[in-house]
Image: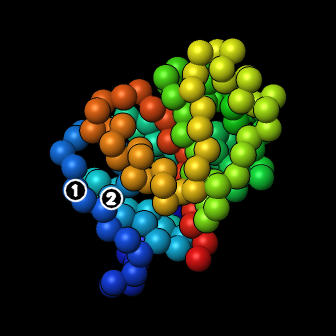
Amino acid sequence: MQHNPPPGSGSTMQKETTDNLHIKGYGPHFFRLNDETEWHNTAILLQNREIITDHEIIPTNFEALTEAHFEAWTARKPTVILIGTGNQMQFLEPKWRAYFYQRGIGIETMATESLCRTFAILATEDRNALGVFFPITE
């Protein structure tokens, strides 16, 4: 769902020149992309120039991840998958890390704020990264 955040709320990141989508600004329950679209109260998936909010591909929170989500991500053939787990870093179970490694896909989890910064760099490098951004809630 797209909305405008209140003025002065959240963080704004340095603008980068790229056609690939990445997070330009973020705050509690919202993301602003470099194409100036804003997404509120939803998790988003970014890969190159595509944004996905379909709950069959990305659930509403990290704890709701299932093998079906991982299969959908793997089918998109990224070289690396980065998951922003919300306010705090959470870890994938070792069996899921192995799932991606066996398919030749790097996988990392980090707090969503860290992912916003990291993913912006990968997007400007035209890396085939898939970013999963769960909202920051506070």
- Residue 125 appears left or right of 98: left
Quarter occupied by residue 33: bottom left
SS of the residue under disc 1: loop
Q: Is residue 55 above or below residue 103?
A: below
Q: Nearer the viewer, residue 35 or 106?
A: 106
Q: Nearer the viewer, residue 22 or 102?
A: 102
Total marks drawn? 2
Verify CB contact (< 8 Å) between mark 2 and mark 1: yes
The residue indicated by pointer 1 is 15
* Residue furthest out toward the bottom: 7
Mark 2, Cα crowd under 10 Å, few <14 / some 14-19 / many 20+, is: many
The residue indicated by pointer 2 is 24
Where residue 118 sits in the image (x, y, percent)?
41, 46
- What kind of residue is marked 2? Lys
SS of the residue under disc 2: strand
- What kind of residue is marked 1? Lys
Where residue 85 sits in the image (x, y, percent)?
63, 54
* Residue furthest out toward the left: 17
